[in-house]
Amino acid sequence: MNTQQYGKKEAERIAFDAFALAYEYATGDGFEIVACGERPDFVCRRADGALRGVELTEVRCEPWSSPFDALDQMWHAMCEKDRKRGQDDWRCAEQAILVLELTGASLSDLEWALDDLPAGDFAQFGFREIWLVDYSTVDAFGEVELYCMRPESMRGRYPRAHPDKKPYG
Protein backbone atom coordinates (compact mmCIF):
# COMPACT_ATOMS: atom_id res chain seq x y z
CA MET A 1 0.00 0.00 0.00
CA ASN A 2 1.51 3.34 -1.01
CA THR A 3 1.42 6.48 1.12
CA GLN A 4 -1.60 7.96 -0.67
CA GLN A 5 -3.63 4.75 -0.27
CA TYR A 6 -2.61 4.51 3.38
CA GLY A 7 -3.71 8.11 3.98
CA LYS A 8 -7.06 7.45 2.28
CA LYS A 9 -7.68 4.38 4.43
CA GLU A 10 -6.75 6.27 7.60
CA ALA A 11 -9.19 9.07 6.69
CA GLU A 12 -11.89 6.46 6.01
CA ARG A 13 -11.20 4.83 9.38
CA ILE A 14 -11.55 8.16 11.21
CA ALA A 15 -14.82 8.87 9.37
CA PHE A 16 -16.04 5.33 10.08
CA ASP A 17 -15.24 5.60 13.79
CA ALA A 18 -17.26 8.84 14.08
CA PHE A 19 -20.17 7.25 12.20
CA ALA A 20 -20.03 4.02 14.23
CA LEU A 21 -20.12 5.92 17.54
CA ALA A 22 -23.12 8.00 16.45
CA TYR A 23 -24.83 4.97 14.90
CA GLU A 24 -24.53 2.97 18.12
CA TYR A 25 -25.95 5.88 20.12
CA ALA A 26 -28.83 6.31 17.64
CA THR A 27 -29.73 2.66 17.13
CA GLY A 28 -28.26 0.73 20.04
CA ASP A 29 -26.37 -1.50 17.56
CA GLY A 30 -22.61 -1.46 17.37
CA PHE A 31 -20.11 -2.65 14.78
CA GLU A 32 -16.86 -4.56 14.94
CA ILE A 33 -14.68 -4.25 11.83
CA VAL A 34 -13.72 -7.67 10.47
CA ALA A 35 -12.19 -6.55 7.14
CA CYS A 36 -11.16 -3.42 5.28
CA GLY A 37 -11.27 -3.14 1.52
CA GLU A 38 -12.63 -1.13 -1.36
CA ARG A 39 -16.01 -2.68 -2.11
CA PRO A 40 -17.17 -1.98 0.51
CA ASP A 41 -14.75 0.05 2.60
CA PHE A 42 -15.47 -2.04 5.71
CA VAL A 43 -17.08 -5.36 6.46
CA CYS A 44 -18.43 -5.30 10.00
CA ARG A 45 -20.07 -7.69 12.41
CA ARG A 46 -22.98 -6.44 14.44
CA ALA A 47 -23.66 -7.57 18.00
CA ASP A 48 -26.16 -10.14 16.68
CA GLY A 49 -23.44 -11.65 14.45
CA ALA A 50 -24.85 -10.32 11.16
CA LEU A 51 -22.30 -9.04 8.65
CA ARG A 52 -22.77 -5.63 7.07
CA GLY A 53 -20.77 -3.89 4.42
CA VAL A 54 -20.24 -0.20 5.15
CA GLU A 55 -19.42 2.05 2.21
CA LEU A 56 -18.32 5.64 2.85
CA THR A 57 -18.49 8.36 0.25
CA GLU A 58 -17.87 12.05 0.62
CA VAL A 59 -20.50 14.52 -0.55
CA ARG A 60 -18.65 17.78 -1.05
CA CYS A 61 -20.68 20.93 -0.96
CA GLU A 62 -19.40 24.46 -1.02
CA PRO A 63 -20.53 26.43 2.02
CA TRP A 64 -22.41 28.82 -0.28
CA SER A 65 -24.20 26.00 -2.11
CA SER A 66 -27.95 25.84 -1.95
CA PRO A 67 -29.62 22.90 -0.22
CA PHE A 68 -30.75 21.78 -3.67
CA ASP A 69 -27.13 21.62 -4.87
CA ALA A 70 -26.30 19.47 -1.85
CA LEU A 71 -29.28 17.19 -2.55
CA ASP A 72 -28.15 16.83 -6.18
CA GLN A 73 -24.66 15.85 -5.01
CA MET A 74 -26.12 13.32 -2.57
CA TRP A 75 -28.41 11.83 -5.21
CA HIS A 76 -25.53 11.49 -7.66
CA ALA A 77 -23.40 9.76 -5.00
CA MET A 78 -26.23 7.33 -4.14
CA CYS A 79 -26.73 6.44 -7.81
CA GLU A 80 -23.01 5.94 -8.41
CA LYS A 81 -22.48 3.79 -5.30
CA ASP A 82 -25.59 1.72 -6.02
CA ARG A 83 -24.30 1.02 -9.53
CA LYS A 84 -20.97 -0.12 -8.06
CA ARG A 85 -22.74 -2.16 -5.35
CA GLY A 86 -24.20 -4.32 -8.11
CA GLN A 87 -20.78 -5.45 -9.34
CA ASP A 88 -19.52 -8.96 -8.64
CA ASP A 89 -16.61 -8.00 -6.40
CA TRP A 90 -18.76 -6.24 -3.76
CA ARG A 91 -18.88 -8.12 -0.44
CA CYS A 92 -22.13 -8.18 1.56
CA ALA A 93 -23.90 -6.41 -1.33
CA GLU A 94 -27.41 -7.20 -0.07
CA GLN A 95 -26.55 -6.16 3.48
CA ALA A 96 -24.69 -2.95 2.64
CA ILE A 97 -24.96 0.37 4.46
CA LEU A 98 -24.19 3.55 2.56
CA VAL A 99 -22.72 6.41 4.59
CA LEU A 100 -22.75 9.79 2.87
CA GLU A 101 -20.19 12.11 4.47
CA LEU A 102 -21.53 15.65 4.29
CA THR A 103 -18.93 18.42 4.24
CA GLY A 104 -19.46 22.08 3.57
CA ALA A 105 -23.17 22.08 4.40
CA SER A 106 -24.84 21.04 7.62
CA LEU A 107 -27.92 19.03 8.52
CA SER A 108 -29.37 22.26 9.89
CA ASP A 109 -29.25 23.64 6.35
CA LEU A 110 -30.71 20.51 4.75
CA GLU A 111 -33.11 18.95 7.24
CA TRP A 112 -36.22 20.67 5.87
CA ALA A 113 -35.39 19.52 2.33
CA LEU A 114 -34.56 15.98 3.45
CA ASP A 115 -37.82 15.76 5.38
CA ASP A 116 -39.73 16.76 2.24
CA LEU A 117 -38.22 14.01 0.07
CA PRO A 118 -40.64 11.11 -0.39
CA ALA A 119 -39.38 8.10 1.58
CA GLY A 120 -40.19 5.85 -1.36
CA ASP A 121 -37.53 7.60 -3.46
CA PHE A 122 -34.83 5.71 -1.57
CA ALA A 123 -36.38 2.28 -2.19
CA GLN A 124 -34.79 2.20 -5.64
CA PHE A 125 -31.36 1.85 -4.07
CA GLY A 126 -30.28 -1.60 -2.98
CA PHE A 127 -28.63 -0.47 0.22
CA ARG A 128 -30.15 -1.83 3.42
CA GLU A 129 -29.54 1.51 5.12
CA ILE A 130 -28.55 4.98 3.89
CA TRP A 131 -27.17 7.52 6.36
CA LEU A 132 -26.07 11.11 5.96
CA VAL A 133 -23.32 12.11 8.41
CA ASP A 134 -22.76 15.78 9.17
CA TYR A 135 -19.00 16.24 9.42
CA SER A 136 -19.38 20.01 9.13
CA THR A 137 -20.18 20.20 12.86
CA VAL A 138 -17.92 17.45 14.25
CA ASP A 139 -17.03 18.27 17.84
CA ALA A 140 -13.80 17.88 19.84
CA PHE A 141 -14.71 14.26 20.65
CA GLY A 142 -15.34 13.29 17.03
CA GLU A 143 -19.10 13.14 17.57
CA VAL A 144 -21.30 13.80 14.56
CA GLU A 145 -24.98 14.15 13.79
CA LEU A 146 -26.78 11.63 11.59
CA TYR A 147 -29.78 11.65 9.31
CA CYS A 148 -31.23 8.30 8.32
CA MET A 149 -32.76 8.23 4.86
CA ARG A 150 -33.39 4.50 4.71
CA PRO A 151 -35.04 2.44 6.15
CA GLU A 152 -38.19 4.48 6.46
CA SER A 153 -38.84 3.22 10.00
CA MET A 154 -35.65 4.97 11.19
CA ARG A 155 -35.85 8.04 8.98
CA GLY A 156 -34.92 11.36 10.54
CA ARG A 157 -32.25 13.31 12.34
CA TYR A 158 -30.19 11.94 15.22
CA PRO A 159 -28.25 14.53 17.26
CA ARG A 160 -24.77 14.04 18.73
CA ALA A 161 -24.65 11.74 21.73
CA HIS A 162 -23.24 14.34 24.14
CA PRO A 163 -23.96 17.85 22.80
CA ASP A 164 -23.22 19.54 26.13
CA LYS A 165 -20.00 17.69 26.95
CA LYS A 166 -17.08 20.06 27.55
CA PRO A 167 -13.72 19.22 25.98
CA TYR A 168 -11.80 19.22 29.25
CA GLY A 169 -14.46 18.31 31.75
Image: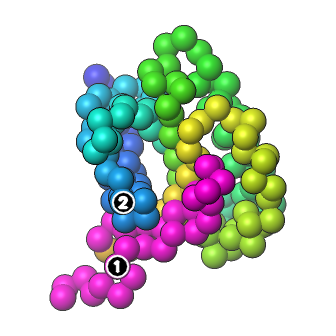
24 left or right, relative to 137: left
Q: Is residue 9 above or below residue 89?
A: below
Q: Is residue 165 above or below residue 70?
A: below
Magenta stretch holds residue 67: no
Front position in the image: 4 or 77: 77
Front position in the image: 98 or 50: 50
Regarding residue 3, the answer to whether it shows in the image is no
Query: Percent from the top left, x then y, of residue 43?
Result: 36, 31
Corner quadrant of residue 110:
bottom right
79 left or right, relative to 131: right
Q: How far separated are the C-alphas under marks 1 and 2?
A: 15 Å
Question: Crowding near pointer 2: few (<14 within 10 Å), some, many (20+)?
Answer: few
Which residue sits at x=61%, y=56%? 153
Three-letter code, disc 2: Gly
Query: Percent from the top left, x then y, of residue 76?
Result: 73, 41
Magenta segment boundaries in residue numbering: 141-169
Query: Percent from the top left, x then y, of residue 36?
Result: 32, 30
Which residue sits at x=43%, y=33%? 53
Three-letter code, disc 1: His
- Mark 1 or mark 2: which comes first in sequence? 2
Query: Percent from the top left, x then y, of residue 99?
Result: 52, 47
Marks 1 and 2: which is nearer the front?
A: 2
Residue named by callout 2: 28
Residue named by callout 1: 162
